[in-house]
Image (cartoon, helix red, strand yellow):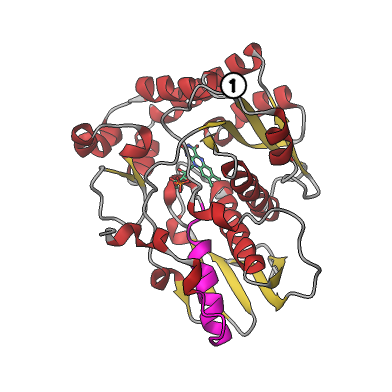
Protein backbone atom coordinates (compact mmCIF):
# COMPACT_ATOMS: atom_id res chain seq x y z
CA UNK A 1 0.00 0.00 0.00
CA UNK A 2 1.28 3.46 -0.85
CA UNK A 3 2.15 5.54 2.22
CA UNK A 4 0.08 8.71 2.61
CA UNK A 5 2.93 11.07 1.75
CA UNK A 6 3.53 9.30 -1.60
CA UNK A 7 -0.15 8.94 -2.60
CA UNK A 8 -0.04 11.97 -4.92
CA UNK A 9 2.00 9.89 -7.38
CA UNK A 10 -0.84 7.35 -7.77
CA UNK A 11 -3.02 9.74 -9.76
CA UNK A 12 -4.71 7.88 -12.63
CA UNK A 13 -5.61 9.46 -15.94
CA UNK A 14 -8.72 7.26 -16.11
CA UNK A 15 -10.10 9.01 -12.99
CA UNK A 16 -10.42 12.32 -14.86
CA UNK A 17 -14.02 13.50 -14.34
CA UNK A 18 -14.60 14.32 -18.03
CA UNK A 19 -18.33 14.87 -17.51
CA UNK A 20 -18.02 16.39 -14.07
CA UNK A 21 -18.34 20.07 -13.10
CA UNK A 22 -15.55 22.39 -14.27
CA UNK A 23 -14.33 22.83 -10.69
CA UNK A 24 -13.77 19.08 -10.33
CA UNK A 25 -11.93 18.93 -13.65
CA UNK A 26 -9.60 21.78 -12.74
CA UNK A 27 -9.01 20.20 -9.35
CA UNK A 28 -7.99 17.02 -11.11
CA UNK A 29 -5.45 18.92 -13.24
CA UNK A 30 -3.88 20.23 -10.05
CA UNK A 31 -3.07 16.66 -9.05
CA UNK A 32 -0.41 16.87 -11.76
CA UNK A 33 0.75 20.39 -10.87
CA UNK A 34 1.78 19.17 -7.39
CA UNK A 35 4.11 16.55 -8.87
CA UNK A 36 6.46 19.31 -10.08
CA UNK A 37 10.00 19.57 -8.73
CA UNK A 38 10.87 22.31 -6.25
CA UNK A 39 14.03 23.51 -4.53
CA UNK A 40 14.54 21.20 -1.52
CA UNK A 41 11.04 19.86 -2.19
CA UNK A 42 9.38 22.72 -0.31
CA UNK A 43 6.46 22.71 -2.79
CA UNK A 44 6.00 26.48 -2.31
CA UNK A 45 2.67 26.83 -4.07
CA UNK A 46 -1.01 27.37 -3.42
CA UNK A 47 -3.91 27.27 -5.85
CA UNK A 48 -7.38 28.74 -6.04
CA UNK A 49 -9.90 27.29 -8.48
CA UNK A 50 -12.07 29.85 -10.23
CA UNK A 51 -14.61 29.54 -12.97
CA UNK A 52 -12.50 28.39 -15.93
CA UNK A 53 -9.13 29.36 -14.47
CA UNK A 54 -6.68 28.53 -11.72
CA UNK A 55 -4.83 31.15 -9.67
CA UNK A 56 -1.32 30.01 -8.78
CA UNK A 57 0.22 31.64 -5.70
CA UNK A 58 3.71 31.57 -4.22
CA UNK A 59 3.62 30.22 -0.67
CA UNK A 60 6.22 32.45 0.93
CA UNK A 61 5.80 30.71 4.28
CA UNK A 62 7.94 28.01 2.63
CA UNK A 63 10.77 30.35 1.66
CA UNK A 64 14.37 29.62 2.69
CA UNK A 65 15.84 32.91 3.93
CA UNK A 66 19.45 31.70 4.13
CA UNK A 67 19.51 29.22 1.24
CA UNK A 68 17.45 31.20 -1.28
CA UNK A 69 17.28 34.78 0.06
CA UNK A 70 15.93 36.33 -3.13
CA UNK A 71 13.33 33.52 -3.56
CA UNK A 72 14.78 32.91 -7.00
CA UNK A 73 14.55 29.13 -6.65
CA UNK A 74 11.11 29.45 -5.09
CA UNK A 75 9.71 31.26 -8.12
CA UNK A 76 11.41 28.82 -10.49
CA UNK A 77 9.68 26.02 -8.61
CA UNK A 78 6.28 27.71 -8.96
CA UNK A 79 7.05 28.01 -12.69
CA UNK A 80 7.62 24.24 -12.82
CA UNK A 81 4.19 23.67 -11.25
CA UNK A 82 2.55 26.01 -13.77
CA UNK A 83 4.18 23.99 -16.56
CA UNK A 84 2.68 20.77 -15.19
CA UNK A 85 -0.73 22.40 -14.95
CA UNK A 86 -0.46 23.50 -18.59
CA UNK A 87 0.71 20.05 -19.76
CA UNK A 88 -2.15 18.35 -17.90
CA UNK A 89 -4.64 20.93 -19.19
CA UNK A 90 -3.56 20.46 -22.81
CA UNK A 91 -3.74 16.69 -22.41
CA UNK A 92 -7.35 16.84 -21.27
CA UNK A 93 -8.39 19.12 -24.14
CA UNK A 94 -7.93 22.64 -22.81
CA UNK A 95 -5.92 25.46 -24.35
CA UNK A 96 -4.03 26.77 -21.32
CA UNK A 97 -3.23 30.48 -21.35
CA UNK A 98 -0.87 31.74 -18.66
CA UNK A 99 -0.92 35.39 -17.50
CA UNK A 100 2.02 36.00 -15.21
CA UNK A 101 1.76 38.38 -12.25
CA UNK A 102 -1.60 39.90 -13.29
CA UNK A 103 -1.57 42.02 -10.08
CA UNK A 104 2.12 43.00 -10.42
CA UNK A 105 5.29 41.40 -9.07
CA UNK A 106 4.63 42.53 -5.50
CA UNK A 107 1.60 40.26 -5.30
CA UNK A 108 1.82 36.57 -4.25
CA UNK A 109 -0.38 35.76 -7.23
CA UNK A 110 2.21 34.39 -9.65
CA UNK A 111 -0.11 33.44 -12.48
CA UNK A 112 -3.65 33.16 -13.61
CA UNK A 113 -3.93 30.08 -15.80
CA UNK A 114 -7.01 30.17 -17.99
CA UNK A 115 -8.18 26.78 -19.16
CA UNK A 116 -10.35 27.29 -22.20
CA UNK A 117 -11.90 24.53 -24.24
CA UNK A 118 -9.33 23.81 -26.92
CA UNK A 119 -9.93 25.58 -30.20
CA UNK A 120 -6.52 24.80 -31.70
CA UNK A 121 -5.74 22.07 -34.21
CA UNK A 122 -4.28 18.99 -32.55
CA UNK A 123 -0.78 19.62 -31.26
CA UNK A 124 1.73 17.73 -33.35
CA UNK A 125 4.26 17.64 -30.53
CA UNK A 126 4.50 14.43 -28.56
CA UNK A 127 2.37 14.78 -25.42
CA UNK A 128 4.52 15.23 -22.31
CA UNK A 129 1.66 14.18 -20.04
CA UNK A 130 2.88 10.64 -19.20
CA UNK A 131 6.28 12.00 -18.16
CA UNK A 132 5.01 13.95 -15.15
CA UNK A 133 4.69 10.76 -13.11
CA UNK A 134 8.02 9.40 -14.42
CA UNK A 135 10.17 12.49 -13.84
CA UNK A 136 12.44 12.72 -10.86
CA UNK A 137 15.70 14.39 -10.00
CA UNK A 138 18.80 12.20 -10.01
CA UNK A 139 20.94 12.93 -6.98
CA UNK A 140 22.96 9.76 -6.77
CA UNK A 141 24.56 8.65 -10.04
CA UNK A 142 23.97 8.20 -13.75
CA UNK A 143 24.33 5.16 -15.90
CA UNK A 144 27.43 5.17 -17.97
CA UNK A 145 25.86 6.08 -21.31
CA UNK A 146 25.97 9.13 -23.56
CA UNK A 147 22.83 11.02 -24.58
CA UNK A 148 22.32 10.82 -28.32
CA UNK A 149 22.68 14.16 -30.15
CA UNK A 150 19.10 14.11 -31.50
CA UNK A 151 17.78 13.77 -27.94
CA UNK A 152 19.83 16.78 -26.83
CA UNK A 153 18.35 18.77 -29.71
CA UNK A 154 14.83 17.79 -28.67
CA UNK A 155 15.58 18.78 -25.08
CA UNK A 156 17.09 22.09 -26.14
CA UNK A 157 13.98 22.93 -28.16
CA UNK A 158 11.97 23.25 -24.93
CA UNK A 159 13.87 26.43 -24.03
CA UNK A 160 11.84 28.44 -26.47
CA UNK A 161 10.69 31.47 -24.48
CA UNK A 162 12.10 34.92 -25.26
CA UNK A 163 15.02 35.93 -23.05
CA UNK A 164 15.97 32.36 -22.07
CA UNK A 165 18.92 30.40 -23.33
CA UNK A 166 20.56 27.06 -22.75
CA UNK A 167 24.26 26.38 -23.15
CA UNK A 168 26.17 23.11 -22.97
CA UNK A 169 29.56 22.86 -21.26
CA UNK A 170 30.82 19.40 -21.89
CA UNK A 171 34.55 19.68 -22.45
CA UNK A 172 36.84 18.57 -19.67
CA UNK A 173 37.99 22.08 -18.86
CA UNK A 174 34.43 23.46 -18.49
CA UNK A 175 33.39 20.54 -16.30
CA UNK A 176 36.40 21.11 -14.07
CA UNK A 177 35.53 24.82 -13.78
CA UNK A 178 31.87 24.11 -12.94
CA UNK A 179 32.84 21.46 -10.40
CA UNK A 180 35.24 23.97 -8.84
CA UNK A 181 32.50 26.63 -8.61
CA UNK A 182 30.07 24.17 -7.04
CA UNK A 183 32.75 22.99 -4.64
CA UNK A 184 33.67 26.52 -3.53
CA UNK A 185 29.98 27.37 -3.09
CA UNK A 186 29.46 24.34 -0.81
CA UNK A 187 32.56 25.26 1.18
CA UNK A 188 31.33 28.79 1.78
CA UNK A 189 27.69 27.94 2.43
CA UNK A 190 28.09 24.80 4.52
CA UNK A 191 30.55 26.58 6.82
CA UNK A 192 27.62 28.78 7.91
CA UNK A 193 25.40 27.42 10.65
CA UNK A 194 22.33 29.39 9.52
CA UNK A 195 22.64 27.96 6.03
CA UNK A 196 23.06 24.38 7.32
CA UNK A 197 20.05 24.75 9.60
CA UNK A 198 17.91 26.26 6.89
CA UNK A 199 18.69 23.49 4.39
CA UNK A 200 18.89 20.74 7.03
CA UNK A 201 15.24 21.47 7.94
CA UNK A 202 14.32 19.93 4.58
CA UNK A 203 16.38 16.74 4.82
CA UNK A 204 14.41 13.64 5.79
CA UNK A 205 15.36 10.15 6.87
CA UNK A 206 14.50 7.28 4.55
CA UNK A 207 11.30 6.36 6.44
CA UNK A 208 9.92 9.88 6.44
CA UNK A 209 6.17 10.34 6.85
CA UNK A 210 6.49 14.07 6.10
CA UNK A 211 4.80 15.26 2.91
CA UNK A 212 7.74 17.43 1.81
CA UNK A 213 11.53 17.72 2.00
CA UNK A 214 14.23 15.49 0.58
CA UNK A 215 14.43 11.87 1.73
CA UNK A 216 18.04 10.83 1.87
CA UNK A 217 17.55 7.69 -0.25
CA UNK A 218 17.31 10.09 -3.20
CA UNK A 219 20.98 10.93 -2.53
CA UNK A 220 21.92 7.27 -2.17
CA UNK A 221 22.32 7.53 1.63
CA UNK A 222 21.74 4.11 3.27
CA UNK A 223 18.75 3.67 5.60
CA UNK A 224 20.70 3.40 8.84
CA UNK A 225 22.86 6.46 8.08
CA UNK A 226 19.81 8.48 7.06
CA UNK A 227 18.39 8.41 10.60
CA UNK A 228 21.00 10.69 12.15
CA UNK A 229 21.95 12.54 8.99
CA UNK A 230 19.60 15.57 9.11
CA UNK A 231 20.75 16.43 12.66
CA UNK A 232 24.42 15.87 11.77
CA UNK A 233 24.07 18.02 8.67
CA UNK A 234 22.79 20.94 10.75
CA UNK A 235 25.50 20.57 13.35
CA UNK A 236 28.65 19.84 11.32
CA UNK A 237 30.19 21.12 8.11
CA UNK A 238 29.71 18.10 5.82
CA UNK A 239 30.92 19.92 2.71
CA UNK A 240 33.48 17.21 1.88
CA UNK A 241 31.06 14.34 1.16
CA UNK A 242 28.62 16.78 -0.48
CA UNK A 243 31.36 18.06 -2.81
CA UNK A 244 32.43 14.50 -3.57
CA UNK A 245 28.87 13.57 -4.57
CA UNK A 246 28.29 16.65 -6.75
CA UNK A 247 31.68 16.31 -8.37
CA UNK A 248 30.72 12.73 -9.39
CA UNK A 249 27.46 14.00 -10.88
CA UNK A 250 29.28 16.72 -12.84
CA UNK A 251 32.15 14.60 -14.14
CA UNK A 252 30.05 11.42 -14.54
CA UNK A 253 27.12 12.93 -16.42
CA UNK A 254 26.64 12.83 -20.14
CA UNK A 255 25.97 16.56 -20.55
CA UNK A 256 26.43 19.63 -18.40
CA UNK A 257 24.16 22.62 -19.07
CA UNK A 258 23.45 26.13 -17.84
CA UNK A 259 20.12 27.87 -18.12
CA UNK A 260 20.52 31.65 -18.45
CA UNK A 261 18.19 34.61 -18.83
CA UNK A 262 18.39 38.18 -20.10
CA UNK A 263 16.54 39.56 -17.06
CA UNK A 264 16.74 38.62 -13.41
CA UNK A 265 13.39 39.18 -11.70
CA UNK A 266 10.40 37.20 -10.40
CA UNK A 267 8.71 37.01 -13.78
CA UNK A 268 11.89 35.74 -15.44
CA UNK A 269 12.53 33.17 -12.69
CA UNK A 270 8.97 31.86 -13.00
CA UNK A 271 9.18 31.61 -16.80
CA UNK A 272 12.57 29.98 -16.45
CA UNK A 273 11.01 27.32 -14.19
CA UNK A 274 8.21 26.82 -16.71
CA UNK A 275 10.69 26.13 -19.51
CA UNK A 276 12.89 24.04 -17.24
CA UNK A 277 10.04 21.68 -16.35
CA UNK A 278 9.13 21.26 -20.02
CA UNK A 279 12.77 20.44 -20.69
CA UNK A 280 12.83 17.91 -17.83
CA UNK A 281 9.66 16.21 -19.04
CA UNK A 282 11.02 16.01 -22.58
CA UNK A 283 14.25 14.56 -21.19
CA UNK A 284 12.32 12.02 -19.11
CA UNK A 285 10.60 10.72 -22.23
CA UNK A 286 14.06 9.47 -23.27
CA UNK A 287 14.97 8.24 -19.75
CA UNK A 288 17.31 11.22 -19.43
CA UNK A 289 17.27 12.73 -15.94
CA UNK A 290 18.83 15.77 -14.33
CA UNK A 291 20.79 16.86 -11.26
CA UNK A 292 20.75 20.50 -10.19
CA UNK A 293 23.52 22.65 -8.79
CA UNK A 294 22.00 25.92 -7.59
CA UNK A 295 24.76 26.69 -5.10
CA UNK A 296 27.16 28.98 -7.04
CA UNK A 297 24.19 31.04 -8.25
CA UNK A 298 23.27 31.83 -4.66
CA UNK A 299 26.60 33.58 -4.05
CA UNK A 300 27.14 36.91 -5.81
CA UNK A 301 30.88 36.51 -6.48
CA UNK A 302 30.61 32.96 -7.78
CA UNK A 303 27.61 33.85 -9.90
CA UNK A 304 29.74 36.61 -11.49
CA UNK A 305 32.46 34.05 -12.29
CA UNK A 306 29.88 31.74 -13.81
CA UNK A 307 28.43 34.63 -15.78
CA UNK A 308 31.82 35.33 -17.35
CA UNK A 309 32.26 31.68 -18.22
CA UNK A 310 28.81 31.19 -19.71
CA UNK A 311 28.68 34.62 -21.33
CA UNK A 312 24.88 34.65 -21.78
CA UNK A 313 23.20 37.05 -19.36
CA UNK A 314 22.21 35.85 -15.88
CA UNK A 315 22.88 32.18 -15.08
CA UNK A 316 19.86 30.66 -13.28
CA UNK A 317 20.73 26.98 -12.98
CA UNK A 318 23.61 24.63 -13.59
CA UNK A 319 22.35 21.11 -14.21
CA UNK A 320 23.69 17.85 -15.47
CA UNK A 321 21.88 15.38 -17.68
CA UNK A 322 22.41 11.67 -18.01
CA UNK A 323 20.67 8.39 -18.60
CA UNK A 324 19.14 7.12 -15.37
CA UNK A 325 16.64 4.46 -14.37
CA UNK A 326 13.40 5.46 -12.64
CA UNK A 327 13.67 5.49 -8.88
CA UNK A 328 11.44 5.92 -5.84
CA UNK A 329 9.91 9.40 -5.94
CA UNK A 330 10.00 11.96 -3.14
CA UNK A 331 6.92 12.83 -1.07
CA UNK A 332 4.25 15.33 -2.00
CA UNK A 333 1.76 17.36 0.01
CA UNK A 334 -1.85 16.30 -0.51
CA UNK A 335 -3.87 18.47 -2.84
CA UNK A 336 -6.23 19.50 -0.01
CA UNK A 337 -3.28 21.24 1.71
CA UNK A 338 -2.49 23.49 -1.23
CA UNK A 339 -5.94 24.52 -2.42
CA UNK A 340 -7.27 27.76 -1.02
CA UNK A 341 -10.64 29.40 -1.55
CA UNK A 342 -10.78 32.10 -4.24
CA UNK A 343 -10.91 35.53 -2.63
C1 LIG B 1 14.59 25.47 -9.31
C2 LIG B 1 15.11 24.22 -8.67
C3 LIG B 1 16.39 24.22 -8.11
C4 LIG B 1 16.90 23.06 -7.52
N1 LIG B 1 18.16 23.07 -7.00
C5 LIG B 1 18.67 21.92 -6.48
C6 LIG B 1 20.01 21.90 -5.98
O1 LIG B 1 20.72 22.88 -6.00
N2 LIG B 1 20.49 20.73 -5.49
C7 LIG B 1 19.73 19.58 -5.46
O2 LIG B 1 20.20 18.54 -5.01
N3 LIG B 1 18.44 19.59 -5.94
C8 LIG B 1 17.91 20.71 -6.43
N4 LIG B 1 16.64 20.72 -6.95
C9 LIG B 1 15.88 19.46 -7.01
C10 LIG B 1 14.93 19.31 -5.83
O3 LIG B 1 15.63 18.96 -4.66
C11 LIG B 1 13.88 18.23 -6.18
O4 LIG B 1 13.11 18.70 -7.25
C12 LIG B 1 12.95 17.92 -5.02
O5 LIG B 1 13.67 17.33 -3.97
C13 LIG B 1 11.82 16.99 -5.43
O6 LIG B 1 12.33 15.80 -5.96
P1 LIG B 1 11.96 15.32 -7.43
O7 LIG B 1 12.47 16.35 -8.39
O8 LIG B 1 12.71 14.01 -7.59
O9 LIG B 1 10.48 15.16 -7.53
C14 LIG B 1 16.11 21.88 -7.51
C15 LIG B 1 14.82 21.90 -8.07
C16 LIG B 1 14.32 23.05 -8.65
C17 LIG B 1 12.94 23.04 -9.24
Q: Position of residue 143 (x, y in %)?
A: 48, 26
Q: Is residue 45 left or right of residue 5?
A: right
How many numbered circles does the render carry?
Answer: 1
* Residue denoted by label 1: 178
- Residue at 44 percent across and 30 percent down: it is 189
Q: Position of residue 274 (x, y in %)?
A: 65, 53
Q: Secondary structure at mark 1?
A: helix
- Residue at 74 percent across and 74 percent down: it is 118
Q: Residues within 10 Å of mark 1 (few under 14, many from 20)?
A: many
- Residue at 63 percent across and 61 percent down: it is 87
Residue 279 among magenta residues: no
Q: Is residue 6 above or below residue 259?
A: below
Front residue of 80/2: it is 2
Q: Residue furthest front?
A: 14
Where does the magenta region start and end? 16-36
- Residue at 68 percent across and 73 percent down: it is 94
The answer to whether residue 225 of the structure is visible from this angle is yes
Residue 28 among magenta residues: yes
Q: Is residue 37 left or right of residue 128?
A: left
Amino acid sequence: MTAKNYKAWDVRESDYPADGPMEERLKFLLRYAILAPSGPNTQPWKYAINDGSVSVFADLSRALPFVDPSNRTLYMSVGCAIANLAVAGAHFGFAPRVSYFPDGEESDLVAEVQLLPDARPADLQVDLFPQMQRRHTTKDRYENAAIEPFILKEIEREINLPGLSLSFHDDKDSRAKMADLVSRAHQTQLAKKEFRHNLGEWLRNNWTTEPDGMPLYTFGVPDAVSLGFPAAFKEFDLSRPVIYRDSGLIHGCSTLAVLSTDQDDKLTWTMCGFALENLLLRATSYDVRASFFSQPIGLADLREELKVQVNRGHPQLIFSLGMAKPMRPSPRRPLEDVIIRPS
